[in-house]
Image (cartoon, rainbow, N blue to C red):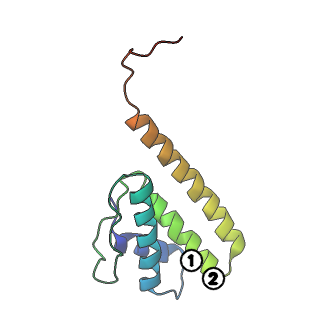
Amino acid sequence: MSTLGEVIARVDAVIPNLISETDKCRWLSALDGQLAAETLTEAVPDSYAWPEDTDRELRLPHPWDGIYDLYLRAMLHESLGELTEYNAILEVFNSTLAGYLRYLRRRDTPAASGQFRTI
C-alpha cells in the first residue's frame, strides 16, 4: 500500500506544479473515501489532513494503488487547464478502476453450492 505522502511525491516528480499539498491531500482523501464506501464496504474515513496524515496508508493494495497516482495526475491536469492530458489520464484511471472492480467481483463471488434448480 502507498501512503498519502508517497503518492503526492511520485506525482509531483512527474508533473511539476504549484498546486498545494493540501489540495492534493483533499483530492486523494475524497477518492479514498469513495472507494471505501463503494467497493470496500467499510466506514467512510474522516478527511485526511496535510501534513498530519502524510504517512497514512491509502486503502488499495499493490498492484491497484497506482489508481491514486492516476487520479491525482488527472486532477492536476484539470486544475492546470490541460484538458487533453486530463481526458487521457482519466481514461486510463477509469479503465484501471474497472479492472480493480472486476477483480473484487471475482474474488468475492460466493462458491456455487449446487442448491439452485432450474425450473
From what the image shows, is residue 52 above or below residue 85?
below
Residue position marked by numbered label 2 in the rendering: 80
Please report the residue visible at 58 percent of the width from the left and 56 percent of the height from the top: 94
Label 2 packing within 10 angstroms: few (<14), some (14-19), many (20+): few
Q: Which x, y percent locates residue 31? A: 46, 66
- Image-based side of 64 in relation to 43, left or right: right
Evaluate if marks 1 and 2 touch, with contact meaning CB atoms under 8 Å apart: yes
Q: Is residue 91 left or right of residue 48?
A: right
Quadrant of the drawing holding the N terminus: bottom left
Residue sitting at 39 percent across and 36 percent down?
107
Q: Residue at x 56, y 77 (%)?
A: 76
- For residue 56, which numbered disc appears in the image? none
Q: Secondary structure at mark 1?
A: helix
Find the distance from the CA under tag 1 to the CA under tag 2: 6 Å
Q: Position of residue 65 (x, y in %)?
A: 41, 58
Instruction: Tell me the residue that label 1 is attached to.
Output: 76
Q: Nearer the viewer, residue 14 or 81?
A: 81
Answer few, some or many: residues within 10 Å of disc 1's Cα (few below 14, many 20 plus, some between 14 and 19).
many
Which residue: 37% across, 25% down? 111
Question: Which amino acid type is shown beneath numbered disc 2?
Answer: Leu
In the figure, 50 relative to 98: above or below?
A: below
Identify residue type, mark 1.
Answer: Leu
Residue 77 placement (x, y as % from top left): 61, 75
